Image (cartoon, rainbow, N blue to C red):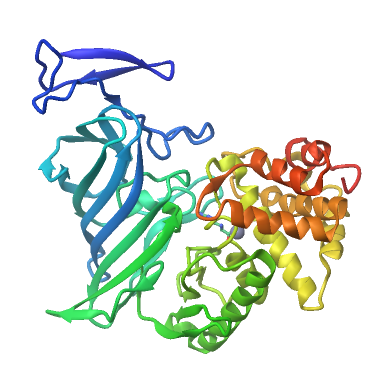
Amino acid sequence: MRLTRALSGALIVVTLTSCSPSGASEHGLTRSGTAGAAGIGDADFPNDGNGGYDVGHYTLALGYDPATRLLAGTATIDATATENLSSFNLDLRGFTVSSVTVGGRPAKFTRSGDEMTVTADLPKGSTFRAAVTYQGEPKPVRDSSNLGTYGFVPTSDGSFVTSEPNGAKTWFPGNDHPADKATYEFRLTVPDGVTAIANGELAGEPTSKGGKTTFVWRETHPMVSYLATMTTGKFLVKTGDSGGGIPVYAAVDPRYQNQLDRLYEVSARITDYWSSVFGPYPFKSTGGIVDDFASGYALENQTKPIYGGFEPDEGIISHELAHQWFGDSVSISRWKDLWLNEGFATYAEWLWSEHQGQATAQQTFDRHYANTTDPMWNYPPGVAQKNDLFNNSVYYRGAMALHALRVRVGDDAFFKIIRRWATEHRYGNATTEQFISLAEQVSGRKLGDLFDQWLFEKGRPATLG
Ligand code: ARG
Ligand code: ZN
């Protein structure tokens, strides 16, 4: 039987495998469910993420062999239905899926492109566990629109895993959009001698059996999918305490052996300093990874930023660690708000420079402002540029917006706004509108004109704000 139902103005065709006259299913539940949407509702990226459920926890039990480049295992997803569902989607790119279960029972599934549709009757509010067993050679995304190669990237000795914006689907099935945060457990099995690094903290010593070693990592704070990592290979590791009481895990590819002590020391010092500026560090550990894959960028993977094939200087380390507060703990729920991540992390670089007695934030602002022909003046940072998501405007004009705010409201109110932003939305998601209203509330001023000029309108603002 085929039913058509209206959902958010769209006609959805639901195919039921069986149907009794009363509409009751074999489990006695009324079949009132509709198909969960194939996207989570981000207007700029309509297929990213999925609708109809919210993931609470992922357990990723995965093995990777750098020699064969095969990734295999089971992803277990604990989620809650947010609508009455007859099916839901998971994002997954490539791989052979051998089985899917929902609530322990085999479930039917179909695949189309990067979308997998799982048939299951799930009443609104019910919690469910889906398990997907799969294997294959991961295929990272090679993006045409300025994003480079991202997702699970096989390297000569392992893998370099940086998934922003939507590359989590290149290594595990899930709800691949920052609006759906979840906690994670990683059970990663690699050949003996290979180190497997994920987010959060190690749950005990790695165990070895039959030539393979399993590393169990737990990220107990909610995390967006693009920050999850499974970085594997030969690594030199240094662990300890930041000085301010935060455990530190630093790892470098042997090629960057001489960087290990510095990566550890600078990451520790900057984490402690940001804790004094932005408020308590949101996670249980900090650190960093330098791998030998030349991605050309860094990513703020939660608890462990990764630097792709270069020696990170203090500026970029200060940027990626500021993201732990802005982006990782306080996350965006739509890509058009990306300046809340990148503008803040870039402004943090300016603050670090100022703190080091180098250029002040005002001097850095002035330098960018003086460049009257910069293309970013035609690219307001508060609007997503789908084909150039990580454009300079999001970084530099976004940072300039914060500096304009600082000059308008004064240092006391400015740093109070920043700290309250980190506190009030800790571990959650937030929007530009919420930031503007917090800034107005804390400063007691109307700031619409300032944010309009700096975030939303084309053209170089005539004044600081
Ligand atoms: N958030 C990263 C940073 O600012 C940039 C990630 C860019 N992503 C990409 N696929 N190139 O450090
Ligand atoms: Zn950044």
Q: Which residue, as the protein is rendered here, is positioned at the far top?
A: 21
Residue 382 image position (x, y, % from top left): 68, 40
Q: In the image, what residue occupies the spot 79% across and 72% down?
A: 354
Q: On the rendered image, what quadrant is the N terminus found in?
A: top left
Quadrant of the image occupied by residue 115: top left
Above or below, comparing residue 37 to residue 258 in the picture = above
Q: In the image, what residue occupies the spot 40% across and 66% down?
A: 199
Whether residue 229 is visible: no
User: Which one is in front, 36 or 296?
Assistant: 36
Q: On the rendered image, what quadrant is the C terminus found in?
A: top right
Left or right: residue 81 compared with residue 131: right
Left or right: residue 382 compared with residue 334: right
User: Which one is in front, 437 or 205?
Assistant: 437
Q: Which residue, as the protein is rendered here, is positioned at the far right?
A: 463
Whether residue 265 is visible: yes
Q: In the image, what residue occupies the spot 19% across and 36% down?
A: 109
Residue 173 image position (x, y, % from top left): 30, 48
Query: Across the whole image, how many numbered discs are drawn on residues?
Result: 0
Quadrant of the image occupied by residue 386: top right
Q: In the image, what residue occupies the spot 50% across and 55% down?
A: 427
Residue 219 image position (x, y, % from top left): 39, 64
Residue 438 image position (x, y, % from top left): 70, 45
Left or right: residue 63 compared with residue 464: left
In which of the image's four quarters is ligand 1 placed?
A: bottom right
